[in-house]
Image (cartoon, rainbow, N blue to C red):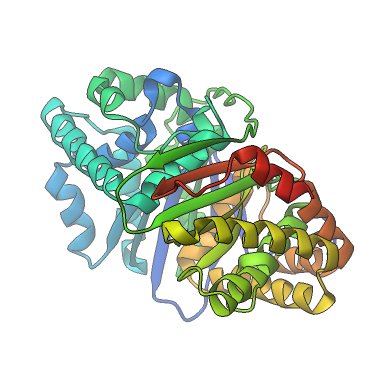
Amino acid sequence: MTDKQTDPAVRISRLPNGLTVATESISGVKTATIGVWVATGSRNERDEEHGLSHLIEHMAFKGTERRSTRQIAEDIENVGGEINAATSTEFTSYTARVLSEDVGLAVDVLGDILTGSLFDAAELAREKNVILQEYASVEDSPDDVVSDTFMETAFSGQAIGRPILGRPDTIARFDAATIRAFMAREYTPGRMVLAAAGNVEHARLVELAAAALGGLPSTEAPEPPAASYTGGERRLRRKLEQANVLLGLPGVSFRDPAYFATHMFAQALGGGLTSRLWHEVRETRGLAYSIDAFHWPFTDCGIFGIGAGTSGSDLAELLDVITTTARQAVRDLEGAELARARAQLKVAMLAALETPGGRIDRAARQLLAWGRVIPPEETIAHVDAVTVEEVRLAGAQALSGPPTLAAIGPIKALRPLRHIASDLAA
């Protein structure tokens, strides 16, 4: 098996305009899940476009030249189907699940909302208000506020760190012309994948895709600016019962050879009930209800983090335990811990492939990132090849970088960031 092989279970075709069609037939399944992924998200937005990707996702269901807002929903739900969309930092997706005999309808609806949306002024005003309500609900949630603050601080002044929802001032300025200009620039066939899994037939999907999306012009989309982890701190003192804190460090891209090792270090450190942080923070000292370590990779960078909530009086001890435990893991992480982290990672990856939705998500993302769908066996082989030394080194590299600290609530006891950085590097 070579590193260039595409999963033989997935059939792939490309339309003349550059759009990729991928299908995976699953025996015994009576439904089909279909989606269109676009390799654009919040990091592709210019400063004045902050929040536009998310607004476009909302507006996709608000009427086209052929369908009203209600008809879009009715056409799918009248046949028992579901339709949804999602926006992330680097991707936007539009998906539908229907019975196999209704695949043609689903593709037609998806194509219609992507090529024929009207962006009616009245609908746009209503949806802006919906997003402002969503924004307000985030502002009322300390967990969400500290998470957004964390990313803004870790990637200071960069689109990759900005909240996906946008800000009230930018949202208010968007109009139909702004949306159309962004879609013309970013929603190009060469960075789009139509993927389907379940009871599907590849040749039929290619025909449907050509009819629905084959008319999109073949143009080149600009690459987003390269991202760079900066680190830093932001402390938000608010009258809350609990302090929420996120401690971040530089991670790696999913393209980086150290990706799997970094992920497994996070898993061993704080990824489950047997992890070091859970045992020390929750079980031994009772400092937090929960604590976790994570690694979020992007195309050209990544971020490693540890998050927990505790009382203001326990905050100093919590940070001390976190830094001490992380340093110790770099020095003496054992083979048994790696084996457990490896098994947990494999279960998570393989479980995601047990649903048609998980399979099209994998196919679309990997085709956009790598130009192929990676066989599970190849990924498992990479995971199995990671050594204890590589995991320790990945942890050491993370801990040696500039930290990010985001905290909200009763946080007076938090030590200066330079002291925390010194503790991590000790």
Tell me, yes or no, if residue 89 can be seen here: no
Position above or below: 409 against 47:
below
Locate the N terminus and report the quarter of the image it occupies. Answer: bottom right
Side of 365 where 56 appears, left or right: left
Residue 395 on image: x %, y %: 77, 55
Q: Position of residue 255 (x, y in %)?
A: 73, 45
Locate residue 354 relative to residue 8 in the image: left or right. left
Q: Residue at x 21, y 30 (%)?
A: 118
Q: Check the image and report above or below for 110 versus 53.
A: below
Q: Quadrant of residue 11?
A: bottom right
Reply above or below: 27 against 371: below
In-front residue for pair 133/30: 133
Residue in the foreground of this view, choosing between 220 and 303: 303
Say whether residue 382 is visible: yes
- Residue occupying image coordinates x 37% and y 42%: 237
**Displayed quadrant of residue 311:** bottom left
Q: Could you tell me residue 42's position as x and y percent?
A: 45, 34
Residue at the (52%, 26%) spot, across then down: 218
Residue at x 77% of width, y 72% of height: 338
Residue 275 in the figure: left or right of residue 147 = right
In percent of width and height, residue 200 lies at 46, 65
- The relative height of residue 125 versus residue 73 in the rendered view (above or below) is above
